[in-house]
């Protein structure tokens, strides 16, 4: 990605770490890792969340409580996060992502 090369090149000659402001769309993971390893503090605007369907909900619309192992939907309904195995620490599937749950 051309913009990652430019950003990395601009900060290569800095004698001291700098605060770098940017957008995640302009940097690759390797470029971010290299800049952080060099001591630069990256303040990046995250990619906006998108709903699965037009006008639908995003992950930010739900309250996920990993300690209580519950999820609250935008309408206020609370449901348990179901465990894949009975003995803690359990891994649970929430929106297609496996999350490590704390012991109960």
Image (cartoon, helix red, strand yellow):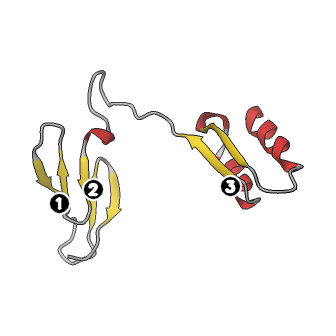
Give left or right: position of 54 versus 79: right
Residue 89 pos. (x, y %): 28, 75
Q: Earlier in the sequence, mark 1 or mark 2?
A: 1
Gap in angstroms between the C-alphas marked 2 and 3: 28 Å
Q: Which residue is mark 2?
A: 93
- Percent position of residue 21, x then y: 66, 40
Which residue in the structure is indicated by mark 1?
A: 82
Nearest to viewer (mark 2 / mark 3): 3
- Image position of 58 with respect to 89: above or below: above
Q: Earlier in the sequence, mark 1 or mark 3?
A: 3
Residue nearer the viewer, 44 or 1:
44
Q: Assign a secondary structure to mark 2.
A: strand
Residue under pointer 3: 33
> Along the horizontal axis of the image, is 36 left or right of 66?
right
Q: Earlier in the sequence, mark 2 or mark 3?
A: 3
Relative horizontal placement of residue 13, taking residue 42 as reference (left or right): right
Q: Quadrant of the N terminus?
A: top right
């Amino acid at each position: 990605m051309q913009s990652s090369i430019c950003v990395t090149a601009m900060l290569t000659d800095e004698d001291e770490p700098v605060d770098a402001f940017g957008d995640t769309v302009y940097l690759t993971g390797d470029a971010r890792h290299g800049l952080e390893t060099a001591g630069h503090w990256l303040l990046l605007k995250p990619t906006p969340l998108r709903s699965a369907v037009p006008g639908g909900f995003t992950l930010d619309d739900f309250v996920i409580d990993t300690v209580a192992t519950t999820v609250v939907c935008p309408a206020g309904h609370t449901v348990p996060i179901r465990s894949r195995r009975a003995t803690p620490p359990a891994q649970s599937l929430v929106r297609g992502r496996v999350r490590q749950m704390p012991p109960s």
